[in-house]
């Protein structure tokens, strides 16, 4: 029976393979020291794959999660491939969701929106890195949808959603190295989703849909909120069989 490999040993092995192509150097050992201090592997490597795209993390946006990659892939597979679509990636962070949409949906155009200027810089870098034509991608600073105009066929959202009352359950390394403003959605985890649902009503085209990630522990309260706001919605599970995202339409 093989001995178990510790998390830090695994991360060092991945770092050596992905960033240094198997060659140890002074820079490699400096990065190992960062890992030993609790720095997150993806920030040390500097990028993370997302549905076949390279997502740079220079400006330290929220690191894309496997759960997000899972549901975005499922949604994109079901969207019309040859149709002109107008899509919004709000709370865009690194831009990973909108970039995946542009790669999959060849006639789509995406507006990337975020309030954080560093996220907007990160998105711009990733659009260029993944060779997205500038005629298909627009970046806008916006407080959720407040500063946007026009209607969208689809809105993708991955807002901060961890309830603050569960902060103790978040890994110490995540709390130390990822911005809390990207993680926490108020006391009940629904602060930003509540605003999103209110604002999205006037931006969804007839037949349009809103796709949004949320904390599984808020599923019951979210169902009540969606109904209160007048949405017809389906709560969907991630690869771990936990409620993770919803698909909603308004009237």
Image (cartoon, rainbow, N blue to C red):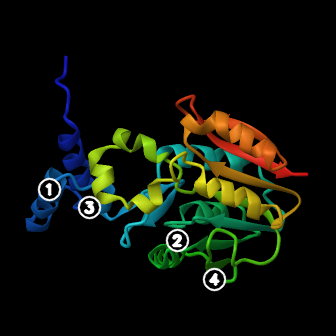
Q: Are marks 3 and 4 in contact (CB under 8 Å)?
A: no
User: Foreground residue, 168 or 2?
Assistant: 168
Q: CA distance from mark 2 to mark 3?
A: 20 Å
Residue 136 vertical position relative to residue 108 in the rendered view, above or below: below
Say left or right for 247 vs 183.
right
Specify which label sits upstream in the sequence, 3 or 1: 1
Give the foreground label among 2 and 3.
3
Q: CA distance from mark 3 to mark 4?
A: 29 Å
Would you identify the image quadrant in which residue 80 lies?
Answer: bottom right
Secondary element at tag 1: helix
| Residue at the disc numbered 2 | 130
User: Which mark, by number, is residue 32?
Assistant: 1
User: Which mark, by number, is residue 134?
Assistant: 4
Secondary element at tag 3: helix
| Residue at the disc numbered 3 | 44
Residue 128, horizontal then vertical, whole percent? 51, 78
Q: CA distance from mark 4 to mark 2?
A: 11 Å
Q: CA distance from mark 1 to mark 4?
A: 37 Å
**Which residue corresponds to the image point at 44% horizontal and 62% vertical from the top-left?**
181
Say left or right for 194 vs 204.
left
Specify which label sits upstream in the sequence, 1 or 4: 1
Q: CA distance from mark 3 to mark 1?
A: 9 Å
Residue 164, horizontal then vertical, whole percent? 45, 47
């Amino acid at each position: 029976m093989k001995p178990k490999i510790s998390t830090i040993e695994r991360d060092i092995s991945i770092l050596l393979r992905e960033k240094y192509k198997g060659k140890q150097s002074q820079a490699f050992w400096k990065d190992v020291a960062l890992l030993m201090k609790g720095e997150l592997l993806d920030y040390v490597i500097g990028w993370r794959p997302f549905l076949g795209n390279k997502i740079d993390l220079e400006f330290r946006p929220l690191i894309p999660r496997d759960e997000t990659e899972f549901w975005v892939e499922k949604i994109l597979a079901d969207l019309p491939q040859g149709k002109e679509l107008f899509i919004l990636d709000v709370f865009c962070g690194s831009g990973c969701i909108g970039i995946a949409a542009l790669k999959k949906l060849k006639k789509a155009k995406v507006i990337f929106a975020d309030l954080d200027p560093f996220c907007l810089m990160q998105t711009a870098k990733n659009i260029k890195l993944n060779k997205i034509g500038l005629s298909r991608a627009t970046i806008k600073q916006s407080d959720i949808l407040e500063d946007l105009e026009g209607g969208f066929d689809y809105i993708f959202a991955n807002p901060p959603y961890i309830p603050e009352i569960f902060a103790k359950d978040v890994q110490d390394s995540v709390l130390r190295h990822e911005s809390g403003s990207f993680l926490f959605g108020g006391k009940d985890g629904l602060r930003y989703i509540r605003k999103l649902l209110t604002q999205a009503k006037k931006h969804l085209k007839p037949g349009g849909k809103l796709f949004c990630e949320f904390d599984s522990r808020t599923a019951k309260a979210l169902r009540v909120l969606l109904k209160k706001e007048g949405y017809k919605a389906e709560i969907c599970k991630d690869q771990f069989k936990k409620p993770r995202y919803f698909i909603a339409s308004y009237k």
